Image (cartoon, rainbow, N blue to C red):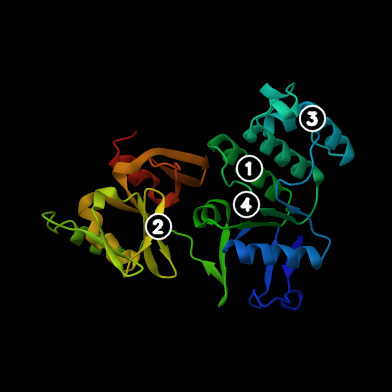
Amino acid sequence: MTQFTIHEKMIDSELLPSFSLTIDGAYTATVYSDMDMQEELTKVLQNNGDFSIFDLQEGLYQRLTIEGNIVFFHKWFQCKTPLAEILVLFALQSSAKKPLHTCTESEIRRVYYAKYFMSGMQPMIFREPIHGADVRTMDTFIYMLQKLKEKQVPLLILVSNLEHALLLGDIAYKLQKSGLQQIELDEGEASEEDESNSAGTSMTTSFFKIPAKVDDKMILFDPLEVDYIESQDGKAMIVVNDASYALDATLGDMEKKLAVYGFYRCHRSYIVNLQKVREIITWSKNTYSLRIDNQSQSTIPLSRTKIQEIQDKFSLK
């Protein structure tokens, strides 16, 4: 089985902690970090091996059509997958005759995906591959990952968004100054959490505000204002109108307090306001998300063990 390893000795940077990571072709690994660390890790990888970082920056041919670009790279990389199958795989068949300079951002991004897929490179390292992408394009990328895993290609994805790390990674890691730590992916909640959740429903709804501290101010939020709550470093962060605020509480604490207001623990790292859920997205057989009705149309990971339960909550068949 093909493997890809980042060794401690490769890392010579004051910004990055020392760590080792081995990835094989059986799974996709994501590394979640801030943009500064991501930029530094990208430089480390480029300086210590014959690695290509797929970051949507490599040149395409603007004067050629989508099909013309696909044909060129298909020949260049001597790709064995039929051209027609490539166009369908990346949802480009209906726009194949469009010159690239007239295409939408989403179409151009899918041409990049097709180019990367046809390159046949191993390992494949992606940087922010679905940042700002629409649902169709995200779905295309996730399907591409499945095809690459079938070929046992080691996959590493660098992201600065925790949702994307959980959505794309079979194994997700968080990189910070203290080191590289694996993020626990939700396989179901413990029985005591279920008990505490049911106990929380007996709380009174007469009056409750969520206190968040910003600098030297204390802001009080009505629960119905909150889009969702996520866990970061063991602390809860509430998201209101795309802005995040730190709470002096854990996700478990907030789950107990907010259950009666229609909040639901959809994933180990997320609690969502069910009134803000606009769409349930099925990315693959075992990968789901909730789309939130806010300005950025945020997507929240939904544990595969919770899909039936949330469908029942919305009375969906």
Q: Is residue 21 above or below residue 209?
A: below
Q: In which quarter of the image is residue 193?
A: bottom left
Tell me how far mark 3 sits from mark 2, CA to CA.
45 Å
**Position of the C terminus by quadrant:** top left
**Going 70% across and 41% down the picture, which residue do you hit?**
113
Residue at the front extreme? 216
Say what amino acid the circle numbered 1 marks: Phe
Is residue 297 visible in this depiction of the protein?
A: yes
Say what amino acid the circle numbered 2 marks: Ser
**Relative to the observer, which residue lies in front, 283 or 203?**
203
Q: Do the residues labelled 4 and 2 touch (CB within 8 Å)?
A: no
Density class for disc 3 (Cα within 10 Å; few <14, some 14-19, many ≥20) is some
Tell me how far mark 4 sits from mark 3, CA to CA.
26 Å
Q: Are marks 3 and 2 in contact (CB under 8 Å)?
A: no
Residue under label 4, please give it: 128
Image coords of residue 257 (percent x, y): 23, 61
Tell me how far mark 4 sits from mark 2, CA to CA.
21 Å
**Going 62% across and 65% down the picture, which residue do you hit?**
36
Secondary structure beneath disc 1? helix
In the visual, does 215 lie left or right of 27? left
Q: Do the residues labelled 3 and 1 touch (CB within 8 Å)?
A: no
Say what amino acid the circle numbered 3 marks: Leu
**Position of the N terminus by quadrant:** bottom right
Mark found first going from the N terminus, 2 or 1: 1
Residue under label 1, please give it: 141
Residue under label 3, please give it: 83
Mark found first going from the N terminus, 4 or 1: 4
Mark found first going from the N terminus, 4 or 2: 4
Tell me the tag on residue 244: 2
Mark found first going from the N terminus, 3 or 2: 3
